Amino acid sequence: MTHSTIPFPEGFLWGASTAAHQIEGNNTNSDWWVKEHSTGTHIQEPSLDACDSYHRWPEDMDLLASLGFTDYRFSIEWARIEPAEGQFSNAELTHYRRMVDGAIERGLRPMVTLHHFTVPQWFEARGGWTAEGAVELFARYVAACAPVIGEGVRHVCTINEPNMVSVTAGLAKRGEIGFPPAGLPTPDEETTHAVIAAHKAAVKEVRAINSEIQVGWTVANQVYQALPGAEDVTAAYRHPREDIFIEAARDDDWVGVQSYTRTEIGPEGPIPAPEHVERTLTQWEYYPTAVGYALRHTAEIVGDVPLIVTENGIATGDDSRRVDYYTGALGEVAAAIEDGLNIQGYLAWSALDNYEWGSFKPTFGLIGVDRETFERTARPSAEWLGSLGRSRELPRRAA
Ligand code: BGC
């Protein structure tokens, strides 16, 4: 008899993810803060207080732990830790160490991301990732994070979605400031090479801090699907936007898979989803199957490097669609595990409704946040997803 669930593999991570700039609020020393207060961008509103998680992180962690999650992925903010070039803030390092300790005290294993899209203003002003010495500056920042990650942190992510970093840089070179659309415009090749070099340097620094840390990075997986006859076009389209970054993870301890939707590719390139398909609040096609494709595609490239789903979710105002989305997605994860893929965790995006790179409107949160009072309310999807952490069972894909 086939059971409708499969047990979590040993040590499986079960959690939710966030990023500093999207939830902390008042990240005033970051490049994004400047962009948010500039005219002529695609940014609709500034992040301002965001979810005020800089102060309210204990509440966020209390909720996640009480819901049943065992892991929490959050990022630490370079712009706070190194507010001026070469000057490190002990107060901010202590702040993030307190978060690491706070997670552990609550039974949440912290997964720490060192860079999630934002950089200090001084780093941007000197030319960003492609400027002379950028890689060394990032490596020096990573080394300075030793007090935060040195003990009790098992998983560290160097750079979140380097492919989005490169695509965003490509957009900026064309005078467009904002978060790239799904499907991804042309990445900036120079930035691609710089962030890959920065990752390799950061991996070395992290391993020097503590050789027991499992270090990797997380790649945005757009699930490029070839229409008949467009296989070569698809492979050529995908490589600079995705595969080159996955290939760079071959020597890592794990690789993060982050997928939300798919992009179909025809002989001329990406094809917009037809009008009739269901769309989420980000206007992406509702496609929970994406994660299954993303996992299998990543495994084909990295071989036996362990995979972790580090983000997966849906922006919706209808929480029952969120439950349906996660049900579909988890069925894909379970099927991939049964097929022998080495998948070591699943972290949903996102723990909270947050600042979605230009707007608060696309609500990805398992937990709703009142924009005035910052009051947190766990949605039914959060209760349900958290309860799977207690049962340690993944729902199987419906036959
Ligand atoms: C990013 C998150 C973002 C999410 C949804 C990923 O690209 O890592 O910061 O909020 O997708 O758009």
Image (spheres, rainbow, N blue to C red):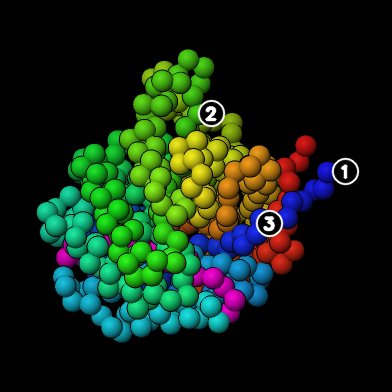
Q: Give the range drawn in magenta.
A: 106-123
Q: Quadrant of residue 244?
A: top left
Q: Which amino acid does label 2 sit on?
A: Pro
The C terminus, quarter of image: top right
Q: Please state which of the two labelled residues, at mark 1 or mark 2, is closer to the viewer.
A: 1
- Residues tagged 2 and 3 counted as in contact (Cβ below 8 A): no
Q: Quadrant of residue 386?
A: bottom right
Q: Where is residue 281 in the image (x, y as percent from the top left)?
A: 52, 48
Q: Left or right: where does residue 179 sit relative to residue 68?
A: left
Q: To which residue does mark 1 refer? A: 1
Q: Does the Cβ of the disc 1 residue fall within 8 Å of ligand 1?
A: no
Q: In which quarter of the image is residue 117?
A: bottom left
* Residue 176 visible from this viewpoint: no
Q: What element carries label 1?
A: loop
Q: To which residue does mark 2 refer? A: 274
Q: Which amino acid does label 1 sit on?
A: Met
Residue 8 bears which disc, if any? 3
Q: Where 188 sits versus 150, above or below?
A: above
